[in-house]
Amino acid sequence: MKRVAGLISAICLVAASASAGDGTRTIGHSVNDRSIIVRRIGPRDANHTALIVGVIHGNERSGTAILRRLRSMRLPDDVSIWLVDEMNPDGAAANTRQNARGVDLNRNFPYHWQAQGRPWDTYYSGPEPLSEPETRAARRFILNHNPDITIWYHQHMALIVKSRGDLRLERLYAREVGLPLRDIGPLPGTAVEWQNHRFRNKTAFVVELPAGSLSLRAVRRHARAVIEVTIRSL
Ligand SMILES: [Zn+2]
């Protein structure tokens, strides 16, 4: 009986996390029911953790090359990195900035959210904070895992956006990849501003990659920079 109960709870556990057993799991679904998938590289109990998001604006996808590179690298023992290739899989499939309802997901987070625009406008905020399933999946994952570092890749301003996280780490990343660190002013409803407000001792920032695809050299520098800032996170 005990064995049966153990088996049932093991099955339930697998179902609850939708795990493939290798650190890969589905954290939510898009408007069009595409899976939002996270892969963990490195040990589950590492002291330094990062979440790296390749795509939130579906027409800004160069960051995925950095995530591919990270998957092939051996990490330092004490580092664990969660990789989400596409937080906006519908937008990535359709090559649109917005999700399938025309919402700019990076204006849909709950901190300083402001109603802006209409569906398919560049900065359409959605009808209310967290109205979109992709934003809710991201929020849930971040609340559950509380990564020390979060990096969101965008294009194509070719700079690191100064955030309210640990400036020392943002400066380090900028130096490692040879891009400037710039303040582009407060924006409503962004993932990074919500995270840095919600988790005061953690750091989330945006990396604006240049236009076009990255050179292999650039991909390597960014992947190294991700690991460097993760190791140095407190
Ligand atoms: Zn963007």
Image: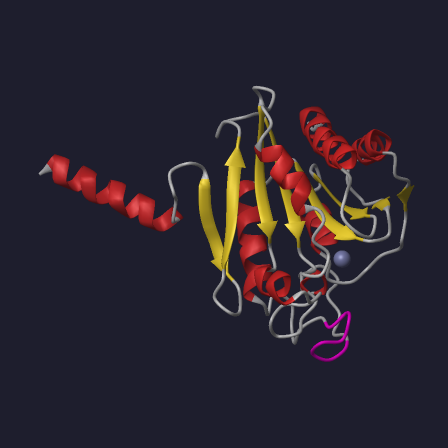
Q: Quadrant of the C terminus?
A: top right
Along the horizontal axis of the image, is 29 left or right of 210?
left
Extreme-top residue of the structure: 77
Given residues 222 and 13, the one toward you in this image is 222
Q: Residue at x 71, y 70 (%)?
A: 125
Name the side, left or right, on which 46 lies relative to 149: left
In magenta stretch: residue 121 = yes
Image quarter of residue 69: top right
Q: Which residues are magenta?
A: 117-124
- Residue 55's place in the image compared with 100, above or below, is above
Which residue sits at x=64%, y=47%?
53
The quadrant of the rendered image in which ligand 1 is seen is bottom right
Vertical relation: 58 (above or below) 67: below
Q: Position of residue 40 (x, y in %)?
A: 52, 37
Q: x, y (%) of residue 158? A: 86, 47
Q: Is residue 29 magenta?
A: no
Quadrant containing the N terminus is top left
Provide residue 208's location: percent of width, then percent of height. 80, 49
- With respect to residue 57, does 176 lie above or below? above
Residue 9 location in percent, x, y?
24, 43
Task: Report the predominant secondary structure element of the magenta stretch.
Answer: loop
Left or right of 207 on screen, residue 130: left
